Image: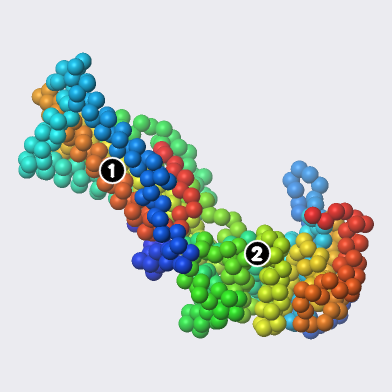
Amino acid sequence: MTTAAPTGNTVSDPPGHSPKEKAAKQRNPRFDVRERPELLLVPAVFVVLILVWEFVIPLFVDDYVLPVPSRIVDSLGQQLTDPLFWGHLEVTLRESLIGFVIGVGTAILLGTAISQVRLVEKTLMPYVVAFQTVPKVALAPLFVVWFGFGLTSKIVMAAVISFFPMLINVIEGLKAADADRIQMLTVFGASKLQVFRMVRLPSAMPFIFAGLDIGIVFAILGAVVGEFIGAKEGLGYLLLQTNYNFDIAGMFAVLVVLSVLGLLAHFLIRFAQRKIAFWAEESRVIAA
Amino acid sequence: MSLRAPGRQTSPATTAETDTDAWIRVAGLDKTYKARRSEPTVALQGIDLSVRRGEFVSVVGPSGCGKTTMLKILAGLVSRTAGDVQIAGNDVNGPLPEIGMVFQAATLLPWRTVRQNVMVPAEVQGLDKERYGTRADELLEMVGLGEFADSYPYELSGGMQQRAGICRALVHDPAVLLMDEPFGALDAMTREYMNVELLRIWQQSGKTIVLVTHSIPEAVFLSDRVVVLSARPGRIAEIVDVELDRPRELSVMASDRAGVYVDRIRRHFNATSVID
């Protein structure tokens, strides 16, 4: 990863220790319900939905088609105590993470080349646009044929699907640098490389993090889709198994696990963003 | 670092001014912008100007007269169509390390502390970190930002940011300080305060300053000489010697003598077009 912002030494020492800010901290607006009513409303909606699902829906829908939340929690409990389940989880995690690192790493290298070298941009951009329009999920059967039922085909799937959002964000981010800032560095005699390191790369950080955020969720998606097509292990495989057995509660349990996985990954990246790109002027998200 | 562009062969200047000791020497400067589909635009024509070492010169003129273009040519950011430009004995064919520049916006990098921002020129030019770090601290102390050295730009007011921008322009001890409407974005009170500050900084540092401004009173208050440019194509309409005593205080602007200078410069604009 090229997250080595030139301000590395300041990362461990985030701003917010000025006298001005201390005064603002007297009543922390981050957790003040009067300032942010959504802090109450979001959990309230959740509770209402669960209650309706638990007590109202069963009056109209059979339990084996749409199991009530309490049954899903039971099923989830069973899964979480089963060592086999943890094996599936580990496989999917491994596929997603390796694929993510490969996809995102390639995107950063290629995106840098495209944004900095005009000839590379002119030559490769038509291909990027063409491949971007291909529905990547539809490639999964092909990858299984090429790379087999093992981990490799899922890693390739995760890499390909997390590659494009990252690529677009890197290209846009490296071009988003403020012209005045570049001019300022130029007046003081900065070389192209210095301009890149001191302005372009830090300016791209919010974009790069947006790409990482989308990329990690897409990587999990890619791994699961790959497992749908052909696999002997993984959460996608488990999802299909429960489906064949008409274990709908079991399916929901796996879905909950997948959602939590995605959420955890998202918050991890947001956390890293706040630490590394702490100044964050704007983070325009570019979805693929 | 080879920031200095290879020396260009220059013909002997056919300039009206023969001051060979000039710290900044502009002779026969023309700038024409060529457009693909329309007539070329003449931005500057026949500019001759010599600035002594340690002098404070302002450039005023109606909007679009090319005063910012002139400053950017001095900074080596914009190429010239004809003429010679020398700063501290160097031909200007690109950014020179002898230049310090202050911009319309402070243009601080938000991911750097104030001190790290001030250090940018020293870092770019590969100067000794420790020595120039001490200098950065001294400069920040001089403009009253000593305790904000480790703050981030967003924690500073506009006037404080611009003061940090001035420190940045001075940190590598440049021969010349170029200022492009540095106080235009500030409110009137802050602006007056910054003018007084700038005079103090100028007197302490002994730098040669070329300041582009919209404000005629500001130019009169600060400068030894005020260069008045005409509307496009920008030519020198008059160079006004401001003979007000130094050190100056804001109260000098209420005097008749200052008023005479302001009126004299303003008359150029009334004759041609409205100043913005």
Q: Give the residue displayed 31% in from the left and 33% down from the top.
A: A45
Locate residue A239, reporting x and y percent.
17, 31
Q: Give the residue displayed 72% in from the left and 68% down from the top.
A: B192
Q: Residue A263 shows which numbered tag?
A: 1
Please identify the quarter of the rendering in which residue B210 is found. bottom right
Subunit under mark 1: A
Locate residue B10, reporting x and y percent.
77, 73
* Residue A183 relative to residue B110: left or right: right
**Label 2 packing within 10 angstroms: few (<14), some (14-19), many (20+):** many
- Mark pair 2, 1: CA separation: 44 Å
Q: Give the residue displayed 11% in from the left and 33% down from the top.
A: A75
Does residue A241 appear in this view? yes
Q: Amino acid at mark 1?
A: Leu
Locate residue A270, reporting x and y percent.
35, 50
| Residue in the foreground of this view, choosing between B27 and B137 | B137
* Residue A33 relative to residue B267: left or right: left
* Residue B266 relative to residue A257: left or right: right
- Label 1 residue SS: helix
Q: Quarter of the image containing the C terminus of chain B?
A: bottom right
**Label 1 packing within 10 angstroms: few (<14), some (14-19), many (20+):** few
